[in-house]
Image (spheres, grey):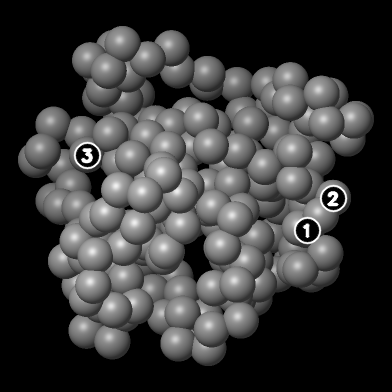
């Protein structure tokens, strides 16, 4: 079983978190999901519902898998040295590191993606990527895999990325069964990104 640390912060985007978690949860025997936050208080999402953390940053930084969701306040997290240091250390220890939407920019702000290909939410692309100038930002991609890093575009793209990570970890058949069990149409083409065109990026 893999340990999966899902980092949350006030205002995290609901589907950025719960969409990938649905896929990464597998059948309950593959991953142990551990919600991690800076403090122990319940953390509100962008839609107001609160999630109770299992661990705080200072307790543990060695997990097999890391998930960082996005949300409008994600970039502010990149100014918090405790958060930045935890992401750096947890990413170094992890077997796979995943990020969604503006969580990808937060990950980039820590320096762990310097020189790597990555992407982010296309509707916010031009307003956010300058925060991580040493990253090789890909304008047209549903998600990007570079080494152990799996980075997705906006919101719903996180589910496609998470399924790709599950396929790499546990096999394509497993990922297919998770998608079918969720009645989700898995977009397997990482480069199939209609939102880049809608945003005028390509």
> Mark 2 packing: few (<14 Cα in 10 Å), some, or many (20+)?
few
Q: How many marks?
A: 3
Q: Position of residue 177 (x, y in %)?
A: 25, 17
Residue at 33 percent across and 40 percent down: it is: 18
Describe the element under mark 2 as helix, strand or loop.
helix
**Residue at mark 2 to residue at mark 1: CA–CA distance:** 6 Å
Relative to 23, is 144 above or below? below
Asked whether disc 2 touches disc 1, contact meaning CB atoms under 8 Å apart, the reply is yes
Q: Read off the residue under disc 3.
A: 25
Relative to 30, is 78 above or below? below
Q: Any mark on residue 129, and which? A: 1
Describe the element under mark 3 as helix, strand or loop.
loop
Relative to 51, is 83 above or below? below
**Residue at mark 1 to residue at mark 3: CA–CA distance:** 30 Å
Q: Position of residue 108 (x, y in %)?
A: 65, 66
Describe the element under mark 1 as helix, strand or loop.
helix
Relative to 101, is 134 above or below? below
Q: Read off the residue under disc 2.
A: 126
């Amino acid at each position: 079983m893999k340990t999966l640390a899902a980092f949350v912060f006030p205002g995290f985007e609901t589907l950025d978190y719960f969409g990938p978690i649905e896929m990464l949860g597998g059948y309950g025997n593959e991953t142990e999901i551990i919600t991690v936050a800076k403090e122990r208080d319940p953390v509100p999402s962008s839609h107001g519902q609160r999630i109770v953390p299992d661990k705080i940053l200072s307790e543990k930084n060695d997990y097999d898998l890391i998930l960082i969701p996005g949300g409008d306040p994600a970039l502010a997290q990149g100014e918090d040295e405790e958060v930045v240091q935890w992401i750096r250390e947890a990413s170094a220890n992890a077997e796979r590191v995943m990020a969604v939407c503006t969580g990808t920019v937060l990950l980039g702000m820590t320096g762990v993606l310097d020189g790597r290909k990555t992407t982010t939410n296309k509707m916010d692309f031009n307003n956010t990527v300058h925060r991580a100038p040493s990253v090789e930002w890909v304008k047209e991609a549903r998600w990007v895999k570079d080494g152990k890093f799996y980075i997705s575009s906006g919101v719903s793209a996180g589910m496609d990325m998470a399924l790709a990570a599950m396929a790499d970890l546990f096999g394509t058949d497993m990922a297919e069964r998770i998608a079918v069990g969720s009645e989700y149409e898995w977009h397997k083409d990482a480069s199939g990104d209609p939102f880049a065109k809608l945003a005028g990026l390509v």
